[in-house]
Image (cartoon, rainbow, N blue to C red):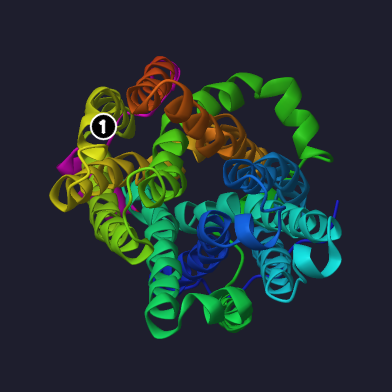
Amino acid sequence: MSAPIPASTPDSPRRVLAASLAGTTIEFFDFYIYATAAVLVFPHLFFPASDPTSAILQSFATFSIAFFARPIGAAVFGHFGDRIGRKATLVAALLTMGVSTVVIGVLPTYETIGVAAPLLLALCRLGQGLGLGGEWGGAVLLATENAPPGRRTWYGMFPQLGAPLGFILSAGLFLVLTETMDDAAFFAWGWRVPFLLSACLVIVGLYVRLKISETPAFRRAIEKEERVSVPVMTILREQKANVVIGTVAALSTFVLFYLMTVFALSWGTTALGYSRVEFLLYQMTGVVFFGLTIPVSALLSDRYGRKLVLALVTVAIGVFGLFMAGLFQAASPLTAMLFCILGLGLMGFTYGPLGAALSDPFPTAVRYTGASLAFNLAGIFGASLAPYVATWLASSYGLAEVGYYLSGSAVLSLVALACIHEERPLAATGRKAAVQAG
């Protein structure tokens, strides 16, 4: 066992929440600039241009690589997060993601080096996936393991806010570039700017994270000698059910988000004829509602229980899937805007409680590994192939089938949510007493 971590002054809630939010914002910014470029740039510059549809599908295939890398990142970073601490592991995860993203910004294209270009792109995408696989679980634990009684979901939603903030930053930057340069300049060098600017954000994130201390829960695990030698093996022996339940419970969350972002942007700007700027604005409006509904769902979950809130929202996602095709293919600005607002608003309601819901079932000694595996395995089954499958369904059978795909994932998540064990939420008076008791 490694040496105990020296005692230090506890961090203020503001510092803890800022560190958890800053890191996930940067990580999701990096992730989303790739997602946006996978639709707008990479099919034209990194793959043979003989068949546009084939190029888009190949670009989506590289997009999916990160989701298969994320469980590996969850196991590797989770091991060190459960063995040596949350803080050091979060710094390493941020560096892994950041370096991979910056390198994409300097890659030569297919025209320059041929088939080596998409191979290098895929390698960088692999690095992004490894980094994000270790980031999410650590950021959630940094917040929830510092939370007072009755406030775990509220604290746990701060790293979740990194998703809409990262999306707004990435989409906003692409919008600015689109509006300030012509297509020739954008495809020649402008698309590289977001990837290179990521280096500045990573420096800020490292500064914030190096200022924090280890979480109280992890310190207690050290004092009680609860740490295990190989956390992932303990998970496979003793916590398999929690991993499976958590993975399936988060399934519809991932399917919904990547249908509303990557697939919708691709289909809207090709089959439905929206301009790049127009549809990015619709999505950014929807993401505002995504960000606004995250804290609302966290407050409701601390009051009435995460399980109930997640179940109700999952039912709403299933219903949305039945009607989403009609809204999306109406091809009018009003319905497109409503489509984005409803879909991404539902995303916020399901995403807010998810961090606490996936992390709580696991013991402290393996919590980093367990929560990260559940979240990132859901990424494989729910998100990695979602843009690809949705494009194939829409091209072959129509948009309605894409909606049924979403509704089917919601049914599976609802079944898993019924199996999640949750402690009864504190009533208002009970919460006050618990906080006063420390």
Name the residue tied to disc 1: 324
Horizontal arrangement in the rendering, residue 8 relative to residue 399 (left or right)? right
Query: Looking at the image, which is closer to me, 52 or 221?
Result: 52
Q: Is residue 392 above or below residue 128?
A: above
Whether residue 249 is visible: no
Tell me the quarter of the picture where residue 259 sits: top left
Point out residue 393 in the picture as x, y percentages from the top left corner.
Answer: 47, 25
At x 43% / y 57%, what residue is drawn? 163
Q: Residue furthest front?
A: 50
Tell me the quarter of the picture where residue 226 sits.
top right
From the viewer's perspective, is residue 51 above or below residue 94? above
Per the rendered image, the range of residues in magenta is 416-437
Q: Position of residue 322 (x, y in %)?
A: 26, 22
Q: Amino acid at mark 1?
A: Met
Q: Residue at x 71, y 29 (%)?
A: 235
**Image location (x, y in percent) of residue 351:** 37, 44
Between 297 and 131, the one nearer to me in the picture = 131
Q: Position of residue 146 (x, y in %)?
A: 47, 58
